[in-house]
Image (cartoon, rainbow, N blue to C red):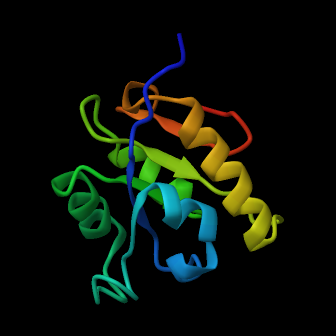
Amino acid sequence: MPRAFHKHKLLLDEHLPDRREFAKLNELFDVKHIAFDLDHAGTKDPAVYHLATAEKRILVTRNEADFRPLIKPRDPGVIGMPAHLRNDQLDTKLTALLKKHSPGYFTGKYRALGGEEI
């Protein structure tokens, strides 16, 4: 029996492109960008993380070193994006990762798009 689809909620960190650059991701999931959608450009990382957790959104970032220490067991989690991939590649790979896993896979964890976790 196929697994039920879950519409994950995501928050894109400031250094990532506008969510409209990720067509597949936007079509399937609830995606917000910290600067372009929420008007919080320049917000410090702990406040970005707090906003993501308050809204129950998985934080998507290329700045995992600053966010890893903030992760708590019941928080939605953080997904690290590699810097070397083009936007279309990130869109495809991130969409595939999210479609494959339920929220429990991300809760309280750092997940790299390449598979690393803590």
In this view of the protein, which residue sits in the foreground, 5 or 72?
5
**102 displayed left or right of 53:** right
Question: Residue 51 at what x, y percent from top left?
Answer: 22, 64
The residue positioned farthest toward the front in the image shown: 1
Residue 92 falls in image quadrant: bottom right
Q: Is residue 77 above or below residue 27?
A: above
Question: Residue 73 at what x, y percent from top left?
Answer: 29, 29
**38 displayed left or right of 18:** left
In this view of the protein, which residue sits in the foreground, 103 or 3?
3
In this view of the protein, which residue sits in the foreground, 22 or 83?
22
**79 displayed left or right of 53:** right
* Total marks placed: 0
What residue sits 38% from the left and 25% below the top? Answer: 104
In this view of the protein, which residue sits in the foreground, 9 or 114?
9
What residue sits 69% from the left and 34% below the top? Answer: 115
What residue sits 30% from the left and 68% below the top? Answer: 48
Q: Is residue 78 above or below residue 6?
A: below
The residue positioned farthest toward the left in the image shown: 54
Question: Residue 100 at what x, y percent from top left?
Answer: 59, 31
The residue positioned farthest toward the top in the image shown: 1
What residue sits 36% from the left and 32% below the top? Answer: 107
Q: Is residue 35 above or below residue 49?
A: below
Q: Is residue 112 above or below residue 57?
A: above
